[in-house]
Amino acid sequence: MTRQEVIKYFLSKPGAWEDYPFDDITPVLKVGKKMFALIRTESPPLQINLKCDPELSRDLREVYEDITPGYHMNKKHWNTVNIQGSLPEEEIKKLIDLSYDLVVKSLPKREREALQKK
């Protein structure tokens, strides 16, 4: 997946939007006011940070070399995923979906309900 394809997939989620709170080149993807992804832009390969259940994070890191503890994030709850490695695109999309869903579940009920109507 290219950077543009990744961003397009992120933005296809209901209520997802792109923000640049850290600098002009590091996109942070949010739903409501909460982050569910960050695209690392420091150097190739293309990598994204995604929220994940702690137990699943541990399991994924053991299975896939392209999934590591979240760079500059809470390593218990975030993974860094190498997008241009050997991880299949469908697996990357599943991880993005999981991150988005985890964050949506933490939103106030009113915000969650509004997203369901979109």
Image (cartoon, rainbow, N blue to C red):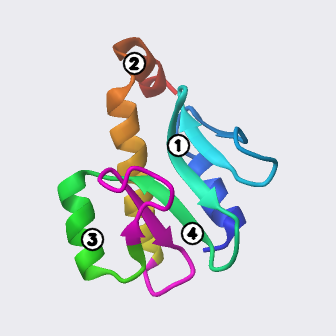
Q: Residue at x 29, y 53 (%)?
A: 76
- Disc with the residue nearer the chain's start (1 vs 2): 1
Q: Which residues are magenta?
A: 68-88
Task: Check disc 2: other Cα within 10 Å, few if <14, some if 14-19, many if 20+.
Answer: few
- Disc with the residue nearer the chain's start (4 vs 1): 1
Q: Amino acid at mark 1?
A: Lys
Q: Which mark is residue 74?
A: none
* Foreground label between 2 and 4: 4
Residue most extreme to the right: 24
Q: Is residue 9 above or below residue 60?
A: above
Q: Amino acid at mark 2?
A: Glu
Q: How many marks?
A: 4
The residue to which callout 2 is attached is: 113
The residue to which callout 1 is attached is: 13
The residue to which callout 4 is attached is: 47
User: Where in the figure is residue 113, as x and y percent of width and height?
Assistant: 39, 18
The quarter of the rendered structure image containing the N terminus is bottom right
- Element at label 3: helix
